[in-house]
Amino acid sequence: MLDSLTIGRRIRQLRSDRGLTLDELGAAIGRAASQVSVIENGKRELKLGELQRFARVLDVSLDQLMTAEPPTKRAALEIALERAQRGPLFASLGLAALPVRKTLSDEAIETILGLHRELERVHGERAATPEEARRANTELRKAMRRRNNYFGELEQTAAGLHAAVGHEGGPLSQRVASDLASHLGFTLHYVGDLPGSTRSVTDLRNGRIYVPLGQSPDADPRSVVLQALSSHVLQHREPGDYAEFLQQRVETNYLAAALLVPEKSAVGILQRAKDARELSVEDLRDAFGVSYETAAHRFTNLATEHLGIPVHFLKVHESGTISKAYENDSVQFPTDALGAVEGQTVCRFWSARRVFDVEDRFSPYHQYTDKPAGTYWCTSRIQPSSRGQFSVSVGTAFAHAKWFRGRDTTNRFHSGCPDESCCRRPPAGLATRWTGQAHPSARLNSSLHAAMPTSGFTGVDTTEVFEFLERHAPAAS
């Protein structure tokens, strides 16, 4: 992408080719020589009018001046060195910036850039450890709790996009999703050869979004499009570390959900349901035609901010391990030594586990659980997926259960976790009978491999993506 460094080096090269001094070029465009020097060094961005003046004085077209390709190999090296020195990694080293002078040879710059790339690689590997991933996830969950999982700025962005395409509430159709894409300058293309490491691919050059032709049964086709559009609207770029990667993912998913379930309409439904003491995630799901998980997530966005109800959310695999979690109601999730929740095992007596034993999969399952932090009410549902079955649960402290449908349930269990005597230690009779007489073969925990991809924070095969774009790019006219 074109930036001030590339334009500055091109102006310097053109000035030199024409035998002009800084003073002469400055006089020709009505600027001091020092100001021209700042521009040539890429330390100031130019407005269109200024670019046109430079192009006129240097006798080139505006397109020639703004060409993204550096004018010479030397200029490309200088630009790369400047970018490296302006980056966060160089700043963290505490070194003084190296002036890019003519006396600095190409070989020296190439060596410095090589060392910088190696530092980036080592830094990336350190940041890509499972421990770093869990720390980042823990900090992000704390930040979400502090704001009650409500992002007002993203709600405003969603409302602005709704207004732009005339969507006034209710379910967001596939047609409206396409209208949003057109409003933002994109066309949608459904393809059967999307790279396996991607959910969608956005071609910024040609204004195209590629999405899979065949969706998995548990995927909402609108979500893939809306997430791609959300990432564009939020101006996300390649993340610098795992914390930024997670933050981008949360923001993208939040904005996509806010587009699917508009705040104003949803709050109206929820407030009326609370007044009638009939709050239900199912009603939110049905009103906007979204998945139960999306409705449950959206409920956590709005429940505390608009209804004054603190809540918790859990997505748990049938094996008992936590996939996603959020809370601001002081419920105590199981954690590892770093405070991470994902990958931990939920107590057998929580509704997130008990729901797997319920025969009626069509009705929501409600339960009270007496936990060390107090009694909590929870509603859970089973959600099948290509990776097995998951339970999706939303709960709140006993004092707030009065607002929910299902508060009259007689299902009640006691949980002493994290005390091992609760459900992690086998009963004495079983232990006596089977200790030393069993040797199970353990399934390797997938989280050992999934903490961080080796090809970067996104785990995307860049070569595969670029080859895909080459295959599908429109022919040059």
Image (cartoon, helix red, strand yellow):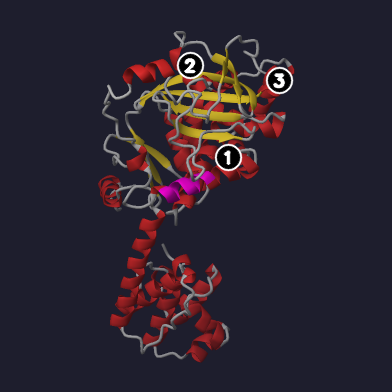
Which is nearer the eye, 14 or 385?
A: 385
Q: CA distance from mark 1 to mark 2?
A: 38 Å
Evaluate if marks 3 and 2 touch, with contact meaning CB atoms under 8 Å apart. no
* Nearer-the-camera pick, 341 or 325: 341
Cα gap from disc 3 to disc 2, whole angstroms: 25 Å
Q: Of helix, strand and loop, which one carries label 1?
A: helix
Classify 10 Å Cα crowding around label 1: few (below 14), some (14-19), many (20 and above): some
Q: Amino acid at mark 1?
A: Leu
**Most prominent secondary structure in the magenta stretch?**
helix
Residue 241: x and y in percent read 44, 55
Residue 450 x/y as whole percent: 35, 41
Q: Which residue is mark 2?
A: 355
311 magenta-colored: no
Q: Position of residue 293 (x, y in %)?
A: 50, 26
Query: What is the magenta range?
Result: 131-138
- Above or below: residue 179 compared with residue 426: below
Q: Nearer the viewer, residue 409 or 247?
A: 409
For marks 1 and 3, the one nearer the N-term is 1
| Circle 3: element type | helix
Quarter where residue 402 is shown: top right
The mark that comes first in sequence, 3 or 2, is 3
Specify the farthest residue to the right.
Answer: 275
The residue that label 1 is drawn on is: 161
Instruction: Answer whether residue 261 is visible to the viewer in this image.
Output: no
Quadrant location, the N terminus: bottom left
Residue 181: x and y in percent read 47, 40
The amino acid beneath tag 3 is Lys
Give the residue at mark 3: 274
